Amino acid sequence: MSADPMLAWLGQPVGASAHAAEIDRIMALVHWLMLIMFVGWGVFFVYVLVRFRSGRNPRAAYHGVRGRWSTWIEGGVLAAEIALLGFFSIPFWSTNVDALPVGRQSTVVRVIAEQFAWNVHYPGPDGSFGRTVPTLVNADNPIGLDRDDPAGKDDLTTINRLNVPIGKPVVVFLSSKDVVHSFGLPQMRVKQDAVPGIVQPVWFTPMMTGEWNIACSQLCGLAHFRMKGVYAVQSQEDYDAWLEEEASFLEP
Ligand SMILES: [Cu+2]
């Protein structure tokens, strides 16, 4: 549940990442501004219907309304929007989107979307991703991973399953095999389009263990509705144990 009554009313899911509170605050401010404008314009509309009714105004006045107050209201809306951008959105973007924490402290994975599944590629203990080749793509190897590449021998791949450890940044290099999908982790306040031909990084720091759904947030075809995966935030020990178990399925 969110602290803001607006977001609570809208049914915002639990915020389980480091940047969740900040993005919620921006979303709450935007929604409050929109509510005020919606009510304000609605009242103004009704006022205009009454004030300028034909019974009271048998002849049209071509000069219109002369007052200045509408200009002041327009200016106020503009100022509020500039403040939202300048004080909230742009600083948030620079610290939580642009500043990609790639390094040893981060969990780095690749997510490759396709109709209608999420392929996840882990680099394995060596920390480097094996080569992927389009001609190797088949039903057993949906990302076309080359196991003959030395960096690819220890790589792990999963379908519709993303596990990450708690408390340190997760960097996802996101791409798509076919159409535009959207990688949505609602509890992490993460949403990013997956576009064929582009590898787009997206990152977050999970702060709460749990298991939720990866939702495709872009209408991507007939079975879009069932394009969901599962993602889990685990303790470091559970995550290491899971990696070990997955590695045990690899052919020696
Ligand atoms: Cu999709």
Image (spheres, rainbow, N blue to C red):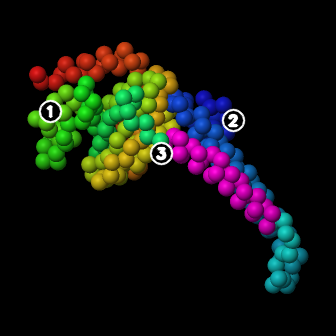
Q: Is residue 122 magenta?
A: no
Identify the residue at image location x=25%, y=33%.
Answer: 128
Tell me if 67 is positioned left or right of 196 in this view: right
Q: Distance between the Cα atoms at labels 2 and 1?
A: 53 Å
Residue on which disc 3 sits:
98
Residue on which disc 1 sits:
150
Q: Give percent across and percent down for residue 175.
A: 32, 46
Q: Distance between the Cα atoms at labels 1 and 3?
A: 32 Å
User: Is the residue under label 1 in contact with that under label 2 (CB below 8 Å)?
Assistant: no
Identify the residue at image location x=16%, y=45%.
Answer: 133
Residue closest to the eye, 61 or 95: 95
Residue type (three-letter) at the residue carrying disc 1: Pro
Residue type (three-letter) at the residue carrying disc 2: Pro
Q: Give percent across and percent down for residue 231.
A: 39, 30
- The magenta region covers 71-97
Q: Distance between the Cα atoms at labels 3 and 2?
A: 30 Å
Identify the residue at image location x=10%, y=35%.
Answer: 148
Does residue 231 appear in the picture of this structure? no
Image quadrant holding the C terminus, namely top left
User: Is the residue under label 2 in contact with that under label 3 (CB below 8 Å)?
Assistant: no
Q: Give percent across and percent down for residue 220.
A: 35, 51
Question: In terms of secondary structure, where does tag 2 sit?
Answer: helix
Residue type (three-letter) at the residue carrying disc 3: Asp
Does residue 101 appear in the picture of this structure? yes
For residue 54, which quarter of the picture?
bottom right
Residue on which disc 2 sits:
5
Residue closest to the eye, 59 or 22: 22
Label 1: few (<14), some (14–19) or many (≥20) C-alpha neighbours in 10 Å: some
Residue closest to the eye, 186 or 38: 186
Comes first in the chain, label 2 or label 1: 2
